[in-house]
Amino acid sequence: MTNKIYNFSAGPSKLPEAVVEIAKNELSNWHGKGFSIMEISHRGKDFGEVLAKSKQDLRNLLGISDNFEILFLQGGATQQFSQIPINMLGGRSADYVITGAWSEKSFNEAKKVSYYKNDPEHQIRLVASTQNSNFTKLPEISEIKLNPYAAYLHLCTNETIHGVEIDPNRLTPLPNVPLIADMSSHILSRPFDIEKFGLVYAGAQKNIGPAGLTLVIVRKDLLGLADLNTPKTWDYAQLAENDSMINTPPTFAIYMAGLVFDWLLNTCGGLENISKINKQKADLLYQNIDNSGDFYINSVQKDCRSQMNVPFIINKNVDKNGELLQKFLAEAEQNNLVGLKGHKSVGGLRASLYNAVTLEEVKVLCDFLQEFQRKFG
Ligand SMILES: *Cc1c(COP(=O)(O)O)cnc(C)c1O
């Protein structure tokens, strides 16, 4: 028996224990067939059922109508930074909002594939950035001048590194400008109205399943805008026509994601339920940070703090040379708390509270924070 591990990794991240248990039990003998799910054709009847059930469960979870196509792709959310403009620009310009490291990357990649790099009418436009605030708040909506003729407006609704979240339910799209959102690190953490969006996408390894799978949900009427010379594995329309199987899909990752969808629907009782627990988890951790007398600090403005990714630091006045941070990480690990190191670009600490992380586990983390402060604060 190994000791229980408390895993707050940002991604790849903790999977629901019940899901890992099912996968373990049927790993070498899937549904009594004598083979594992990894060892059979993606075009056969057995895997076909896994794929169909995964998609249907995802439709049920998010209330995805037939107006939308679900694509199970590869290449990560990072590939989507290029694949989206290739498929969605249709010779026009697009608007980008930068609220953290990930939306900044998506903007920079989109510029590389825009049609007319020096023509302002056809550019990838930056319409708002919160870099001046070190990405600790959201842009003032009233300050944003959106292009009503843009091919789309792109946002990242949860910045995994900076811990800034936009509640998808509070967005109001312009009438003819599809909203596109990178939801990698908070999709399935709460219900939202997919009908407001033209496309949402997510790398699976945060809140869906293991790495290797990228989820794209796209409105069907927006398909078919890619250039005719677009390679077919990059063309959403051709991928949709081929049920995401132009090349062999990541079958094991799709199977695991399917188990997670089933767990969310049938064990957790859907996204409304899990979102309540997610809110409790985040509230508890932020309270502990805010009540630490500035020993621990999260600088994100309260109305846009992420419920999934909580970056924080130990006060620089207390921890002048960063020794306490190292001590924190070492002590945490001794207590079986792992994955708490902040992203290398910002340093400090970060706790990710994805669906698979329980309220009890967050309580253990909060107890540890208090204990560490008592000892060293
Ligand atoms: C992790 C992450 C990405 C990158 O995902 P990959 O699958 O590694 O390409 C992009 N956007 C956000 C918001 C992320 O959290």
Image: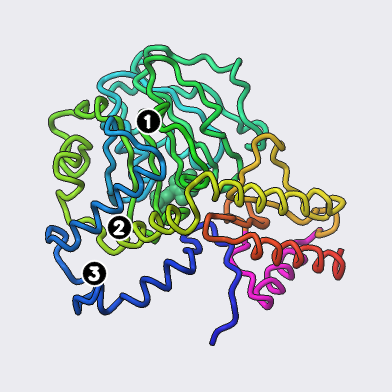
* Quadrant containing the C terminus in the rendered view: bottom right
Q: Position of residue 359 (x, y in %)?
A: 64, 59
Please tell me which of labels 1 and 2 falls first in the chain. 1
> Left or right: where does residue 304 sit relative to residue 252?
right
> Left or right: where does residue 132 sit relative to residue 292?
left
* Mark 3 neighbour density, 10 Å: few (under 14) some (14–19) many (20 or more): some
What is the total number of numbered labels drawn onto the structure image? Answer: 3
* Location of mark 1 (residue): 111
Q: Is mark 1 within 8 Å of ligand 1?
A: no
Inter-mark Cα distance, 1 to 2? 31 Å
> Which numbered disc, 1 or 3, marks the residue closer to the eye?
3
* Quadrant containing the N terminus in the rendered view: bottom right
Please tell me which of labels 1 and 3 falls first in the chain. 3
Whether tag 3 and tag 2 are in contact, CB under 8 A, the answer is no
The residues colored magenta run: 320-341
* Location of mark 2 (residue): 254
Q: Is mark 3 within 8 Å of ligand 1?
A: no
Residue 38 disc label? 3
Secondary structure found at label 2:
helix
Which amino acid type corresponds to the residue marked 3 in the rendered image? Met
Secondary structure found at label 3:
helix
Q: Examine the image and state in which quarter residue 240 appears.
A: top left
Determine if the magenta segment contains residue 333.
Answer: yes
Q: How is the image coloured?
A: rainbow
Inter-mark Cα distance, 1 to 3? 38 Å
Q: Position of residue 119 (x, y in %)?
A: 34, 16
Vertical side of 5 occupied by 324: above or below: above
* Mark 1 neighbour density, 10 Å: few (under 14) some (14–19) many (20 or more): some
Whether tag 1 and tag 2 are in contact, CB under 8 A, the answer is no
Camera-nearest residue between 6 and 35: 35
